[in-house]
Image (cartoon, grey):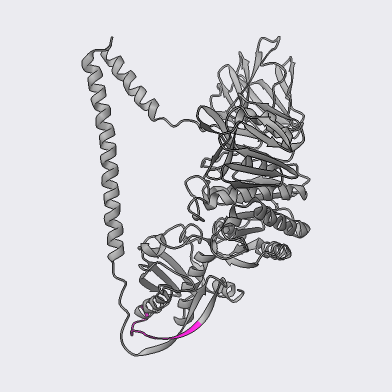
Amino acid sequence: MKRFALAAAMLALLAAAAPVEEKQLAVFAPLTSYTLPVVERAGHEYVGLLELLEPLGRVSSELAGKRWRIRYDDTEGDFEAGRNQARIHGKDISLTAPFVIENSRGLVPLASLGLLLPRFLGMNVDFHESGRRLLVGNVGIRPSFHVESGPTRLVLNFGRAVNPTIATEPGRVRMVFKRDPVTSPGSQTIAFENQSITQANYSEANGQAELDVAASVPLIAAFSNNGQTITLSAAPAAAKTATNPVASSATPATATPTQNPPAPAGGVPAPSRPIAVVDAAHGGDERGAALTDRLAEKDVTLGFGRLLRHELEQRGFAVVMLRDGDVNIPMDQRAGMANGAHAALYVCLHAASQGSGAIVYTSLLPVEGQSAGVFRAWNSAQAATLGNSRTAATAIVQWLQKADFTTRAASASLRPLNNLVMPAVAVELAPGPGGLEDLASANYQQKAAVAVAEGLASVRDKLGAQP
Amino acid sequence: MIPRHLVLSVAVMLVVVIAMGIYIRHVRNEARKVESADADVQPVAPPAAGPTEAVTLYVAYDAAGQLRAQAAQIPLPGGRQQRAEELLRALLNIYRQPEAGHPLAAASDVRSVYLVDPGAAVIDINSAFADEHRSGVMVEQLTVDSLVETLAVNVPGIQRVKILVDGKGRDTLAGHADLMDWFDVETVKQAVGGQ
């Protein structure tokens, strides 16, 4: 009894020290999907409104004392710190909790998103508050189930390509959808009239959707129909019961370091559009340069990256964003993810407080390593495509100049440029005429993003797809 | 019912753990103060004396984002390695001036330059140089280009250069410029010439 009590006390201590999972909101829109951190203030959950709207369109904000104004396309929203009332496009709206201003960021209560966002976006949103998932427009994917006999199979049709992580355990298969706007099939539990595959349960939590399929036999999963169909069937009798995760057709990305570089965030884009990789430098505990006392380089690059993603998608690129949140991804992993995406081009984004305008960099190749046959030396993998990289850089510089940026092209020993097999550039954004404040300005970043996207679009045909 | 002495034991253990955590943090902060104080008082190597020679320094200017060749007369010792060290110290001296166009920390210094035949040079800078360097692609690359180009132009036969910090490899100078590989002098020369 004494030993049990001591063990319980130790476990309690360990549990108290265990890391708490960060709360996040997953947003799914027609052209993009991303996650945002959710913070808790005075017992309510909040999310940054500017960060929420930024990837969806042109957005800017102004702070005057306790009043905060946000402009999304042509819609203006006026908020005041500590007040539950807001005014969106001339109409009053009640928030479920007081508006908060923190470090010039406007935070709105999570529970109010279902009411707020249609006013800004001009379209319906489907907000699942308990699961922290927000679907903008008609992006939801509702799966359909079909059980076949002889041999027993469960066929799940999604209508669009999906990319879940799949784990098989004795008696169940667990599919977790982090990047796909999968929604409930109609009811939380679907029972099948089958002795082997008995039922499927749907749930949502912390931005993810999960489908659990219960079975009395070990199951294996297979993708088909370009990732639109997942078929669960009984594992061969000779196979052992699987307890390890089963790889999907395109291993989904995580932001944690792994042995083998995973496929990048955003799933596998449609093959008909050229793939552009956008890499917001730094992240997590690697803040980058301290641009001001409060503004870190990692925050500017992420905002800039999201805007660039939007602009590139508008111009016909399928965009893979290596980091879509505040996480640190090692350089080798970034290079592996980009190379693994077989992208047509790669853009890395930096920001600096020195200088003005923007500088576009290509790789300053080091002393070349030994390439062997089809294998390229890691530290000089960029050598074969450096010419195309410079073509892209020149085009970006021209478009930045048209947009009145002070700009030039240069070379830099900047990872992971050296390790990439596709045309690769880095853009370092510096202050404009408005000084350091420009770096935090969505308008300024938007202007640069448009210029970079136009530059890349203008040379898209010259860059060529990667093998 | 948990015995009272057991509850007291766990409570005492908790207090000890918390107290030790606070003490360890205090000791670590004190150690950091001592380290930075030592770094601050480490003297920069005094300039060499003797007859001067004409050299070309490639000096960085942040406003223009480029290097400019600048003729200088500096005293250089006889040995090839010592000459390389004094050359780079003369360059750093420019960057340590109050109104420098590319300011570096006052404690920045080159610890040594190793010339390894054939054609390799290793520049060993001190930790203050890297730790207190401003962070940014342009400013860091200008420093790297300036060191490599100045060395290569004035020390015949240098083909590749490596930069170490306190004798050890380091991923980046200050978060951006990659220091893990050897710099090819010819590539840097072309890049500098294209600015």
Q: Nearer the viewer, residue A411 or A219?
A: A411
The residue lying furthest to the left in this view is: B5
Q: Is residue A208 left or right of residue A57?
A: left
Residue A129 drawn in magenta: no
Give coordinates of residue A422: x percent, y percent. 66, 56
Query: Is there any visible trace of residue A264 in the rendered image?
Result: no
Residue B78 drawn in magenta: yes
Give coordinates of residue A390: x percent, y percent. 67, 65
Q: What's the residue at 57%, 33% (across, down)?
A: A46
Report the magenta residues as a range: B70-81
Residue A82 higher or lower than B88, as above or below? above
Residue A330 higher or lower than B181, as above or below? above
Q: Is residue B55 left or right of residue A114?
A: left
Give coordinates of residue A363: x percent, y percent. 59, 63
Q: Quadrant of the N terminus of chain B?
A: top left
Give coordinates of residue A216: x percent, y percent. 61, 13
Q: Nearer the viewer, residue A225 or A199?
A: A199
Q: Is residue B84 left or right of residue A108?
A: left
The residue lying furthest to the bottom in this view is: B51
Query: Is there any visible trace of residue A93 in the rendered image?
Result: yes
Q: What's the residue at 69%, 10% (across, down)?
A: A194
Q: What's the residue at 31%, 15% (across, down)?
A: A4
